[in-house]
Image (cartoon, helix red, strand yellow):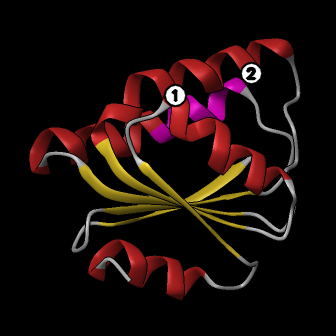
Amino acid sequence: MIAYELDSEHNILLVHPQSALDENDFTELAKAVDPQIEANGDLAGLIISAPSFPGWDSFSAVVTHFRFVRDHQKHIKKVAVVTDSHLADVAEHLGSHFVSATIQHFPAGQVEQARQWIINGS
């Protein structure tokens, strides 16, 4: 399950993976973010806040996740990964080869610092 908040003023999507991700999570995210992109253009940023990565509940959820990334990555300028998981370091290095967004890792609990990095560039 993914909880999310859409900051329309700053055009930032904040997501909180809370349990194993399923296909419906990405369908719901698309329903929330697609109208925002259509109305206001690209998102300034995406903040992924997760103390640890919860994984996926099925292989089809993995496929749906990758499809969501493929379809939306060109509409997101910056991605902040807020976690203490070592997976964030891997995501930062691998992601830079597959997505057009700038990716930055922040320690867990630094959501506001991540938000300021997206808004102000620092």
Whether pointer 1 and pointer 2 mark residues with C-beta atoms closer than 8 Å, the reply is: no
Q: Distance from label 1 to label 2 (Cα)?
A: 19 Å
Write the residue at 84% across / 70% down: 84
Q: Nearer the viewer, residue 26 or 97?
A: 97
Return the disc, 1 or 2, that comes first in the chain's sequence: 2
Compared with 117, 22 (above or below) is above
Query: The magenta stretch spans which residues?
Result: 23-29
Compared with 10, 40 (above or below) is above
Write the residue at 87% across / 19% down: 58
Q: Nearer the viewer, residue 58 or 78?
A: 78
Q: Please give left or right for residue 16 compared with residue 96 in the image.
A: right
- Residue type at tag 1: Phe
Main structural element of the magenta stretch: helix, strand or loop?
helix
Write the residue at 63% across / 19% down: 64
Please check the rendered image and state whether residue 95 is part of the magenta-colored stretch, yes or no: no
Q: Please give left or right for residue 33 compared with residue 39 in the image.
A: right
- Residue type at tag 2: Ala
Which element type, helix, strand or loop, lies under badge 1?
Answer: helix
Q: Position of residue 87 (x, y in %)?
A: 83, 50
Q: How many residues crowd mark 1 within 10 Å: few (<14), some (14–19), many (20+)?
A: few
| Residue marked by disc 1 | 98
The quadrant in which residue 48 appears is bottom right
| Residue marked by disc 2 | 61
Q: Position of residue 122 (x, y in %)?
A: 38, 83
Q: How many residues crowd mark 2 within 10 Å: few (<14), some (14–19), many (20+)?
A: some
Q: Nearer the viewer, residue 93 or 101?
A: 93
Q: Position of residue 115 (x, y in %)?
A: 44, 78
